[in-house]
Amino acid sequence: MGLMRIVEEGLVDVISLNENEARILMRTLSLGDFPIQYGPQDVLKAGCRLHDELKCTVDIHTPFGSTSVSNHEQTCVPTHKLVEGFATGAGDVWDAGDILGHLLRLGARERLEIANACAYLYVASGRAGLPGLQQLQRFLIGGTRTKFGRNLTR
């Protein structure tokens, strides 16, 4: 498999997946099942199995929360609840927020909070608008579970 070749060559630091992609990859690598009806513990278990096999950080995002598993920690952060919104592309926006967190060298909890906030703001916009850094910073500082004042625009 091409993925295993690049993983074995040390070319992968992080892999980011939604729950369906994690399910398919686990099946492909014969790592067990990721149930169709799942909960946070199933996502964490999938992240741990994939991390153990791939030897890289594994980030999984789902409608109810995000999980990151690395050599140093296992972190789960719930998402922000929305009744309805424009969800097509939300996973890509989540990935962009996750990448931003990695580039800023944030810890897993802060990184997942940023990624979840990006996806929430995108879905809540109702018009497929991408959140800007100032909008994201206002949202994060203005009342989410994790309040941190790091200036994202620097």
Image (tube, helix red, strand yellow):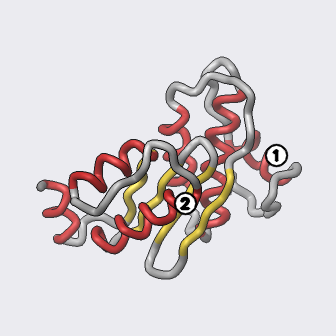
Q: Residue at x 54, y 53 (%)?
A: 98
In the depicted structure, whether residue 149 falls above or below residue 117 = below
Q: Residue at x 65, y 29 (%)?
A: 123
Q: Which residue is mark 1?
A: 138
Which quadrant of the view contains residue 66? bottom right
Q: Residues within 10 Å of mark 2 (few under 14, many from 20)?
A: many
Q: Position of residue 72 (x, y in %)?
A: 50, 81
Quarter of the N terminus within the rendering: bottom left
Residue farthest along the top direction in this orientation:
127
In the depicted structure, whether residue 20 falls above or below residue 128 = below
Q: Position of residue 124 (x, y in %)?
A: 71, 28
In the depicted structure, whether residue 1 falls above or below residue 132 = below
Quarter of the C terminus within the rendering: bottom right
Q: Residue at x 30, y 46 (%)?
A: 24
SS for dot 1:
helix
N-terminal of the pair, mark 1 or mark 2, is: 2
Q: Are marks 1 and 2 in contact (CB under 8 Å)?
A: no
Q: Position of residue 42 (x, y in %)?
A: 50, 58
In the depicted structure, whether residue 80 falls above or below residue 31 = above
Q: Is residue 102 visible?
A: no
Q: Residues within 10 Å of mark 1 (few under 14, many from 20)?
A: few
SS for dot 2:
strand
Identify the amino acid type marked 2.
Answer: Thr
Q: Which residue is mark 2?
A: 67
On the picture, is 126 further left or further right than 58?
A: right
The disc label shown at residue 73, or none: none
Q: Is residue 139 visible?
A: yes
On the picture, is 34 further left or further right than 140?
A: left
Marks 1 and 2 sit apart, C-alpha to C-alpha, by 24 Å
Q: Residue at x 22, y 66 (%)?
A: 7
Q: Position of residue 111 (x, y in %)?
A: 61, 60
Identify the amino acid type marked 1.
Answer: Arg
